[in-house]
Every structure is written in structure tokens, then in C-alpha cells.
Image (tube, rainbow, N blue to C red):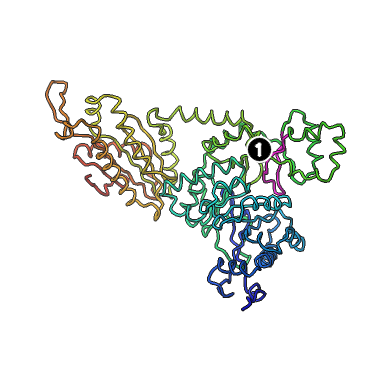
Amino acid sequence: MAIPWEEIIVTLDYAFQPIVNLHSGVCIGVESLLRNVDRAGFSSIGELFDAAYEDGYLHTLELHLREKAIRKFAILPSFHTLKLFFNVDTRVLEMPNYRPGNTVKILERYGLPPERIVFEISEMHRLISLDTVRKILEQYRSQGFQVAIDDYGTGFAGLQALYLCEPQYIKIPRFFIEGIVHDHRKRLFLSNVTAMSHTLGILVIGEGVETEEEFYACAEIGCDGVQGFLLGKPDVTVHHIVSLYPIVEVLHEKNRRKNPKTQKLIENHLEAIPPVSVHEPLETVCRVFRQSPQRTFIPVVGVHQEPLGVIWEYHLRNILYAPYGRDLLSNPSLHNTEKFLLRCPIFDIETPIDMLLSAFSLLDEVPCVLFTHEGKYLGLLDPQGLLKVIYEQRIRGFRDANPLTQLPGNQSIYEYLHQSLREEDTPFAYVYFDIDYFKSFNDRYGFRQGDRIILLLADLLKKTFLGQCFFLGHVGGDDFFLGVRLEPPAFSLGTLWHHVQEVLLSFSHHAASFYAPEDLERGYLIEKDRFGKTRKMPLLSATAVMVYRPPQVSSLTIDTLSEVVARLKKRAKTEGIRSLICIQEEKLACVSS
């Protein structure tokens, strides 16, 4: 029975979901998501495209669907500043009627330039041939289209697709975003993927962002854009798409995790070299080089000032210095500036400086790192400038970091307390850890083993309290500080208290392995006090005291907090209590570990 494709096409529709700049809230574009598949008689989108593929109708179906999406996109009030992300089934390349150039004709009918379209290539489907796809994508790019790898990390191609397809974007699927707040492996994976993508000049979009915690996690790992229910749900109407999403600014203000010192440090070394448009003829670029002979490269931007890369004077020498160079510039084949474009690492100005280290891996091949603000070109750093920024940041960190654990020291702890106590609308908890009977252990086994015990507690704290809501510092010796932004239901006071107890128990368990068998079997150490009297000293354990600061409480200061903690620690030591928690100065619970 023949499939009524014309009726099916009429039934199908597209919903748009916004993709938003994570730093500014500016709408980057919309993803077109197919709807009414069930009304067309199919159980899933995959089944629809499989049927079209088997029927030899896939390319024709794709063209009809592209026109549907483009037609709806063209009626958006701000379409001229947005990009349309459109999923491509790579099997269209196998269709006998496949011909390139059809999408450009559709765009011409609606007055849209090709750079408004981003073709999404999903890793979820086996590519027919990476080499074939690469050639097709090169053809797309030569026409002005952009490319995104969708569902990155879930398919079979992985790094091979990233390397060969040379996308402008990669999209991290919901699988990796969900649970990232408490999943160290996901956070590590995405941090590395983001760093690698940025060094290749690729922007990263986190998909399926549904909670504030997931938004903050995406910010921490360095995503450039976000997409998900937190910003906006897919809708077949277009009225919900706006040019700016104020929720992003609200979230940043609420979180208050921006580091103006870091941003200022980058700005101090930034070179604001004027860029050229990718649509400028090559003759204009050559004229800039002639007028500025000291300049070896020029940044290139798109129609909305988004950085695309640089043009290196070295690559133009054969034209600039040829006997008939001016005549060569009149050759239409050399009019396309993009043919000489060199991709560079691209970072937002608010990117943590430590993440810039990844850019060094490419500085033998590219001349600079480009920086953006709200998605627009801001300036650049050459290798010397980048090195100065990283060096100055490291010097600042070394001045305060504890030399043994490399955790922030007292100055950083003070700054954290000063900032957090000002955030009266947000609940915080402050936890102080110290090791019991550490001096006895240190005297018996020496400083080296003592340092290992301190590192044991530091490592347990680092592994347990990982994420944006935590600040971990080393007060000194065997004392540690933990500050926690409590944001229920993702992380409640009860959950924090449970993790604190786990750390205390785990420390006691692991510390036992540092003792000699006879001391461990005896269950205590024997030492002599200064009067020569023999004493029995218990084995190592750890104590934690916590002060909970509820929201809308402004009476707690750094000085009063220190006094409360001192009293709690004294009581815990005196009464043999391993953990205490209080609300301000009122005790909430006493729990023995």
C-alpha cells in the first residue's frame, strides 16, 4: 500500500524551543522539533524517517519539512538575529534524487541568508560515511550554513565526528545534564569536552536544562548556551520566542558566583583589535594588512559580531606579494574571505582562567584566543598575553592556597564568608572539621604520616563536596572549612548533614590503616605527658560542627560565627560528641558519630 506522503506532510508541524546564551540571556536561536507524528500514523519520529528512507522518499520529505520550519521561522519578530537549528537525517545522501543547493533556493524565497541555518547532525544515528558527510558539510559551509553535532557523547563516532565534521556547535544531551550536580564522572567528562571544544573554536550548548542547579552546573563547566524547560518549552506557536530571557540574569544575580577580579584580569591584557566581517571581500582584508604592516592576523566576525576565527597574513602572502597580486584579487574565486578563515579557541570573558589552560595546546597552530561578551567579539589574547593572565592568576592563588592540600586558605575563606553572609535571601551552612588526637598520632608516627592523614581528610572532603554550591577551604593544620549554599530540594540541610556523617565515618575507617598492627589491636596509643605520666590516647577520629544560617537572617557576622563555632567545638571535645549542628546560637541537634 502506497504511503500518502502529501497528506502526512500537511499533518506534520514544528515546535520551536529557544536556545539561550548562558551568560547574557540573549536568544541564540531556536531548535525546530517535529510534532504531530502520531496523527500522521507513526509511533515515533524515527519510525517516520525510517519509512521515508525505505520508500525512497527521504530527501523529498526533508525538503518539505525544511520549508515548513523555515516558513515558520521567518515570521518570528526577531528572526533576523536568530539561528534556526534543524535536524538532518544523513541518510538523505543515499537518496537517488539528492541534489545540493535546494535549501538555498528555499531560503531565497523567504529572504533569509544561509548563515541563519544550523544543520544538526545527530550522533545517535550511524553516519553512512564520515568522509562522505565531511564533504557534504564542507559544501554546506561553503554556502554559508553552519553545523552542529547533536547528542554528543551518545553515539558511536565521538571524537572522530568532532574532528572530521568541524562543527560550529556541539550539543550536550540531557543524559549528561541530568544528575550532573552530584555526579562527579559526568562533570569531569563534560568539563573535558567543553575545554576541548573551545580550543577548537566550537561553542557548547547544554540541552535538557530543567533546574537551576543544572543551569549553574552548565555555567561552571563552561557551556556557552543552554536549552531546556527552565528557559522555555517547545511550542508550535511562535509567540513564546523572545530576544532576551531575563531569567538568566535573575539566576546569575541569585547565584552571585561571578568573579569580577578574574574578568578584570583578562580585560587588563585584552587586545581590542578591530575585526573584519566574513562578508568583506578579500581585497579589503589585504588593504587592512597593508595599512597595518605590524599586524600578522585579523579577527573575523559574522553578521552579528560573533567571532568566527582569524585570517593569518602568512596564508595570504602568495597573493599579497605576487607580481600580479592586485589582478589576482579580482578573481571571483578569491572573493570569499571565509576560504582563508582559521578557527581559533573562543571563550566568554567570564570563563574561569583555569579553563584557558586548554587553549595552550593549540597555540602552535593558531595565533591567538578570541573572547566574547554576550556572544559578541570583545578582543583577543596572543600567547604572551594568555600566559601573563594565567601566571598572574596562579600567583594570586599560590599566595593564599595551603601548600599541602592546595585548598584555598584563610583569605579566600574570609572573602567567601563576607560574600555569603550578605546574601540574606539564601540559606547557608558553615561546617568546620578538625582531626581529634592528631598531635598524639603525629608524635608517634612523624610529620610525614601526619601530612598523609591531613591529605586523607582533604581528599574525602573534595570527593564528597563537589559542585557549585560548595566552597572548601583549609584553615590550617588539621582544620578545614566547608561553606554550603543550600538550595532545596536539590540539596537540603538533612542531605548535607548525612554527607558530613559519612565523611566522619569514612575518615575513621581509612585512618585505621595508618596504624601499626599492635596499636590498632590495642585500640589506643600510649604516650607520656610532660610530667612523665603514661596516658592512653584514643585513635584518630574527626569532629564536625555546623552552623546553619536560615534565609532572612542578618544578625550573623563573621565574628559571631567564629564565637559560635569555638563554643561548639569546645563542647564537642568536652562531651565526646563527634558532630554538632546549630541554627545561629540555638542548638538544633546533637548527634554522636
Asked if residue 478 lies left or right of residue 237, the reply is left
Please state the total of marks drawn on the protein image.
1
Q: Amino acid at mark 1?
A: Gly
Name the one closer to the observer, 459 or 581: 459
x and y percentages locating residue 321 in the rendered image:
82, 31
Residue located 31% across and 30% down the image: 452
Q: Which residue is mark 1?
A: 379
Considering only vertical position in the picture, is 450 above or below 232?
A: above
Q: Mark 1 Cα within 10 Å, few/some/many (few <14, many 20+)?
A: many
For the record, the magenta segment spans 297-312
Indicate the secondary structure of the residue bearing disc 1. strand
x and y percentages locating residue 364 in the rendered image:
62, 32
Secondary structure mostly seen in the magenta stretch: strand
Residue 567 is at least partly visible in this image: no
x and y percentages locating residue 59 in the rendered image:
67, 64
Residue 433 is at least partly visible in this image: yes
- In terms of image quadrants, where is residue 383? top right
Name the one closer to the observer, 273 or 187: 187
